[in-house]
Amino acid sequence: TQLLEQSPQFLSIQEGENLTVYCNSSSVFSSLQWYRQEPGEGPVLLVTVVTGGEVKKLKRLTFQFGDARKDSSLHITAAQPGDTGLYLCAGIYNFNKFYFGSGTKLNVKP
Amino acid sequence: DTEVTQTPKHLVMGMTNKKSLKCEQHMGHRAMYWYKQKAKKPPELMFVYSYEKLSINESVPSRFSPECPNSSLLNLHLHALQPEDSALYLCASSQEGVSYEQYFGPGTRLTVT
């Protein structure tokens, strides 16, 4: 059973399109993180959100934390081939305990 | 220096072998983690060390034995593994605190034959 469900699981889009990835749980997180992972490498942290309703922007990426701190979304504007990778959300419960979402594999075609 | 290093990068071992994975960080982080990642799956938490003490063991079989010799080093000792233990083993570290931003190493690709 996956504590954190991500959708969609796979996404293949053309360069320049917009997309949104969702991360949902029935549990409340103390904070939530988004990572991107390239094949054969470790995940790289993109952002941490802590406060319910928080919105953070990182260039073309916009991250939102739900008001109830149970869900989050990642929106990418004008996707580029360099955005290709596995996007993972990770919820933090009870200090130091991380659970990763099921992952969204994004492919941006030139 | 925001790097977490892991050695070896690749490891092939038989089911009767004993081997160790090593992880090192020099960011002053006091929490260190071991994760296991199977192909096309997200990382699964195995162990957490906080201030050099084991704080979380996610019901990992005893053939995996973690060790934290000091605040910069984390080892994972492997013994009598099974082929289904083949995976990418990731080490991470973080500061203690509400954001717990983890920095991951590149992983060790383990194959058990």
Image: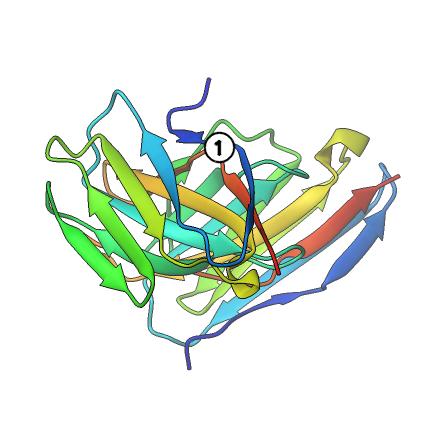
Q: Quadrant of residue A101?
A: top left
Which residue is located at x 24 percent, y 42 percent? A95
Q: Is residue B90 positioned above or below B85 on the image? A: below
> Could you tell me the amino acid type at mark 1?
Ser
Number of other residues with Cα within 10 Å of mark 1, as a class: few under 14, some 14 to 19, many 20 or more: many
Residue A33 percent location from the top left of the image: 31, 49
Secondary element type, mark 1: loop
Image-based side of B62 in relation to A87, left or right:
right
Which residue is located at x 51 percent, y 62 percent? A80
Which residue is located at x 20 percent, y 57 percent? A56
Image-based side of B8 in relation to B105, left or right:
right
Q: Is residue B63 positioned above or below B93 on the image? A: above
Q: Quadrant of residue A52?
A: top left
One can see residue B100 in this view:
no
Nearer the observer, B89 or A108: A108
Residue B87 percent location from the top left of the image: 70, 42
Q: Is residue A62 positioned above or below B58 on the image? A: below
